[in-house]
Amino acid sequence: MSLDQAIKSAQTSVPECVSVGYVDMSTGMLLSVSTVDSHPSEVLDLVAAATADLFQGQSVTTIEKMFRKARGQPEDGAHYFQEILVFSDNLLHVFLRSKKYPSQAAVFVCRASVNIGMALTKSRSSMPGIEEAV
């Protein structure tokens, strides 16, 4: 299955999902996107940049280093932040770091009326299929 097909499949499996994107945070590129609405490329590029900032921004990496130091753990490149939920007035954004490719992440955007637990569960369960398609 291609990445585009895997993204479309994920979108249909997550309740009230209006958009799914897959981001390579090391390059800041949006590798694939499926959405029910059309969006300007500038908006999609900003989603990719925001995803990278959320997971790999300077403050986040500083916090991760402090956690490792406080716990006596080595600088092994492991990340503490794997999932981030962002609530807006009308939407829920679920950001999931890939377990197989830690420099990549998926973004699932659902209507705010979605059952949050179902959105998170279905988003998580769709990640292996997306990772296989990369």
Image (cartoon, rainbow, N blue to C red):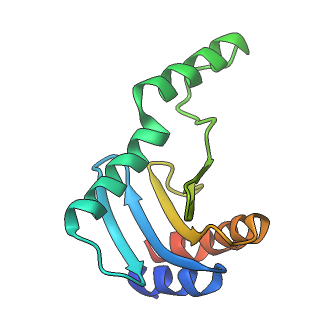
Q: Quadrant of the C terminus?
A: bottom left
Left-right relation of 15 to 94: right
User: What residue lies at 70% left-to-right and 64% top-to-bottom?
Assistant: 120
On the image, the x and y values in percent for residue 75 come to 55, 22
Q: Is residue 86 visible?
A: yes
Q: How many marks?
A: 0
Left-right relation of 51 to 78: left
Q: What is the quadrant of residue 24 in the picture?
A: bottom left
Q: Nearer the viewer, residue 110 or 6?
A: 110
User: What residue lies at 51% left-to-right and 29% top-to-bottom?
Assistant: 60
On the image, the x and y values in percent for residue 108 come to 54, 67
Q: Nearer the viewer, residue 112 or 60?
A: 112
On the image, the x and y values in percent for residue 126 come to 63, 74
Left-right relation of 67 to 132: right
Q: What is the quadrant of residue 96 in the picture?
A: bottom right
On the image, the x and y values in percent for residue 92 come to 59, 62
User: What residue lies at 62% left-to-right and 80% top-to-bottom?
Assistant: 16
Q: Is residue 57 above or below residue 31?
A: above
User: What residue lies at 64% left-to-right and 69% top-to-bottom?
Assistant: 123
